């Protein structure tokens, strides 16, 4: 009897300690003990031990104003683990459980996760802008590193939507069974406490192990995730490494931290050419590595930083917008000078150097570039960096098209830019803006395919105060009115709904915008540039695009050539190689590698080539001679044209087989592989990404 009473009391103490951890000392332990006589009738103490434990849990949680959801978690943790760790749950997990309960997430009910279609997922991937190419080298690195550990490497956007998944063996399939795959949302509101969603909520590296997940179905997982921060400290995405819960805690933390720092460093090093970069560290030999701090400077104004710079300076992200003199005692460095000493006002000393701005493609034009109010650094939905445009892209034909388009815009005529994905439609639009008479006025870019259906009208046309639940008190003028006096660039115009087409047509007719919820119409003056990869004339014939809107937009049209039709691919490869910094790292391409790149058909066009070159340079060792074996597998295979407008004579064949990859063969391979794309690709003898492109072409 005495030993049983001792065990009950010890259990009660354990749960009291756990409870005080939840509220971080907001309730005193003595107050909880006062509940014992009222909560547990002494005569029944020995009658049912499990009921006593459950009663203790309920009373402790009620005392601390926690909901019954948390009680189930503590009971589950105690019975499943029965170890001291239950009393030492990380504060991040406890805060997440609170948030999930407040959000109405139900522990035993996981909503069915319907993955996005390939088309929908592709839209989100493109909307993420530079995020994917920036992160891809690290996904490859982490995938190889954890290849033998039953793990999967994931990339999610800033909202928690998984954009890419890498893994091998059975665990990739197991991860898919719990919806840990591309096209599924893993925010806390959707999936409860999990590393991706909780890392976003906490803006920190997070580990969630086993029973720490909110849903019991995820208890077999261990997950480590960390956010990627852009140049202003905003979350641009999340990298997650998930595996079997039996793996040792912390196994992925070091590698993930390093990869995050690599990505953030790469992000700032590929900033626009008009900005200077201050690179600094305590030790000279760390300059040029991901460990260095980097500040982006527009003159003497700080417009961006990486987290290493914030940490080294002992500052916060509020340093954005400050002047050089507020941080450093030493006068501003001169671009191109040798490494110099930097001294902060707090006495910290660093070795640093200031890099000159890289030459911009806009310098090739007759008119000097115009400074924009907002720095165009890659963010969650980035602007196109004009520094990434090489002179090779502006061949004679493209330059003539640019000149004609500028004349059309100066005459206030709308222009449609037609071209496949990756041919440089937005780059052309920005060059038109830079060289036209409206260069000093706004350039407002809107991706019609990326706007949420329910928010399109309010986003474009603005709204009055109180127009809908959650509307800002001051209302919003809308993106269209922001373009007043300048250029309104409508990207993916072919994906605009008929309802929105009608609203846009009215704006073009009346030259006025009326916000949702009433209010006066505001006159607006802009020129429209539109871009699409679709055949708008065919859509008009099919009734999916309004004829009257088409003729208002179609005063002049530019048709950008795909990369496979260009005869100067070698020059473009060389130009990108220079811009990516390969000569600075003494990197070279073998003749075979260069020829393989020239021969490839580039379904993703200039963007795909630019991303590959950046990846090759990022992954190469200093002084490396990059051979054909260093290329990803798909670039070593037979070139395969897959763009929608490929002629029928350009047959699609699987590597080494000579067989056409027809829709029927692809469907058959998918069915035989139970719709696992990687397995189907192996059956067909092609790379998985190649199969995805075929599926997009055939709308499978």
Image (spheres, rainbow, N blue to C red):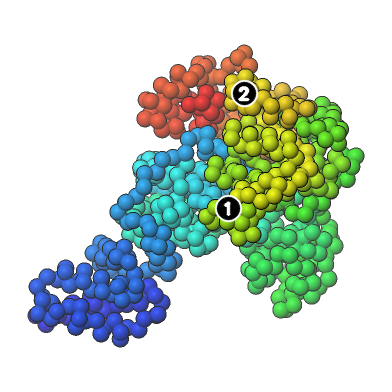
Disc 1 on helix, strand or loop? Answer: loop
On the image, which quarter does residue 20 sit in?
bottom left
Residue 261, above or below 589: below
Q: Which residue is pictured at 78% across the width and 38% down the height?
A: 527
- Of 277 and 507, nearer the camera is 507
Q: On the rendered structure, is 567 left or right of 437?
A: left
Other-residue count near label 1 (Cα within 10 Å), few / some / many at <14 / 14–19 / ≥20: some
Q: Is residue 245 visible?
A: no
Other-residue count near label 2 (Cα within 10 Å), few / some / many at <14 / 14–19 / ≥20: some
Most distant residue in the right direction: 366
**Percent position (x, y) of residue 418?**
71, 28
| Label placed on residue 50 | none
**Percent position (x, y) of residue 390?**
78, 38
**Percent position (x, y) of residue 686?**
51, 27
Q: Which residue is pictured at 79% across the width and 75% down the height?
A: 329
- Of 616 and 210, nearer the camera is 210
Q: Report the residue marked by disc 2.
A: 539
Counting residues from the start of the chain, the first of labels 1 and 2 encountered is 1
Disc 2 on helix, strand or loop? Answer: helix
As measured in the structure, the alpha-carbon distance from the residue carrying label 1 to the one carrying label 2 is 34 Å
Q: Report the residue marked by disc 1.
A: 467
Q: Which residue is pictured at 73% across the width and 35% down the height?
A: 509
Residue 78, above or below 608: below
In this view, the mark in front (1 or 2): 1
**Percent position (x, y) of residue 104?**
38, 58
Q: On the rendered structure, is 151 left or right of 580?
A: left
Which image quadrant: the N terminus?
A: bottom left
Q: On the rendered structure, is 75 left or right of 466?
A: left
Q: Is residue 511 visible?
A: yes
């Amino acid at each position: 009897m005495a030993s049983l009473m001792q065990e009950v009391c010890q259990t009660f103490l354990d749960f009291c300690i756990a409870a005080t951890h939840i509220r971080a000392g907001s309730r005193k332990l003595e107050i909880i003990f006062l509940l014992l006589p009222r909560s547990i009738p002494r005569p029944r103490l020995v009658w049912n031990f499990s009921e006593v434990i459950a009663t203790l849990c309920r009373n402790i949680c009620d005392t601390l104003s926690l909901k019954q959801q948390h009680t189930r978690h503590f009971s589950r943790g105690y019975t499943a683990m029965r170890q001291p760790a239950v009393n030492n749950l990380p504060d991040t997990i406890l805060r997440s459980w609170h948030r999930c309960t407040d959000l109405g997430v139900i522990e035993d009910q996981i909503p069915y996760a319907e993955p996005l279609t390939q088309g929908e997922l592709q839209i989100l991937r493109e909307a993420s802008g530079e995020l994917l190419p920036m992160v891809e080298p690290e996904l490859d690195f982490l995938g190889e590193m954890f290849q033998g550990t039953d793990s999967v490497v994931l990339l999610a956007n800033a909202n928690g939507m998984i954009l890419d998944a890498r893994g091998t063996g059975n665990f990739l399939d197991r991860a898919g069974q719990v919806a840990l795959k591309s096209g599924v949302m893993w925010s806390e509101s959707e999936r409860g406490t999990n590393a991706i969603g909780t890392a976003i909520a906490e803006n920190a590296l997070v580990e969630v192990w086993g029973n720490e997940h909110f849903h019991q179905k995820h208890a077999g997982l261990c997950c480590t995730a960390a956010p990627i921060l852009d140049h202003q400290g905003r979350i641009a995405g999340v990298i997650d490494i998930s595996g079997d819960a039996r793996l040792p805690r912390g196994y992925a933390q070091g590698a993930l931290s390093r990869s995050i720092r690599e990505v953030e460093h790469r992000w700032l090093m590929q900033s626009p050419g008009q900005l200077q970069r201050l690179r600094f560290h305590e030790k000279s030999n760390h300059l040029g590595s991901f460990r260095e701090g980097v500040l982006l400077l527009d003159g003497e104004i700080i417009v961006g930083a990486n987290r290493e710079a914030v940490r080294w300076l002992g500052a916060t992200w509020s340093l954005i917008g400050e002047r050089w003199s507020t941080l450093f005692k030493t006068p501003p460095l001169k671009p191109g000078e040798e490494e110099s000493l930097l001294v902060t006002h707090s006495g910290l000393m660093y070795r640093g150097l200031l890099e000159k701005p890289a030459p911009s493609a806009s310098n090739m034009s007759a008119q000097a570039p115009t400074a924009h109010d907002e720095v165009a650094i890659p963010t969650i939905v980035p602007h196109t960096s004009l520094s990434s445009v090489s002179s090779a892209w502006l061949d004679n034909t493209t330059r003539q098209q640019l000149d004609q388009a500028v004349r059309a815009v100066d005459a206030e005529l709308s222009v449609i830019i037609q071209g496949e994905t990756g041919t440089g439609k937005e780059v052309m639009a920005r060059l038109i803006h830079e060289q036209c008479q409206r260069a000093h006025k706004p350039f407002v870019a809107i991706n019609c395919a990326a706007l949420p259906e329910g928010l399109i009208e309010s986003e474009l046309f603005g709204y009055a105060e109180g127009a809908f639940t959650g509307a800002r008190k001051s209302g919003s003028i809308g993106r269209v009115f922001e373009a007043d006096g300048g250029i309104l660039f409508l990207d993916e115009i072919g994906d605009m709904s008929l309802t929105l087409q009608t609203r846009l047509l009215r704006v073009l007719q009346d030259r006025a915008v009326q916000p949702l919820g009433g209010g006066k119409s505001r006159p607006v003056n802009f020129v429209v540039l539109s871009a699409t990869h679709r055949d708008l004339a065919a859509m008009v014939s099919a009734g999916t695009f309004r004829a009257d809107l088409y003729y208002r937009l179609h005063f002049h049209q530019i048709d950008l050539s795909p990369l496979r039709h260009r005869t100067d691919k070698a020059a473009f490869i060389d130009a990108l190689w220079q811009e990516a910094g390969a000569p600075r790292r003494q990197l070279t391409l073998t003749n075979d590698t260069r020829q393989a790149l020239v021969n490839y058909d580039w379904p993703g066009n200039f963007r795909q080539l630019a991303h590959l070159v950046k990846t090759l340079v990022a992954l190469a060792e200093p002084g490396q001679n990059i051979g054909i074996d260093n290329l990803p597998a798909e670039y070593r295979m037979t070139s395969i044209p897959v763009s929608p407008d490929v002629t029928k004579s350009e047959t699609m064949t699987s590597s080494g087989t000579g067989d056409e990859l027809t829709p029927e063969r692809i469907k058959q391979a998918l069915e035989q592989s139970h719709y696992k794309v990687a397995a189907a690709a192996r059956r067909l003898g092609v790379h998985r990404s190649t199969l995805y492109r075929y599926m997009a072409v055939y709308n499978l």
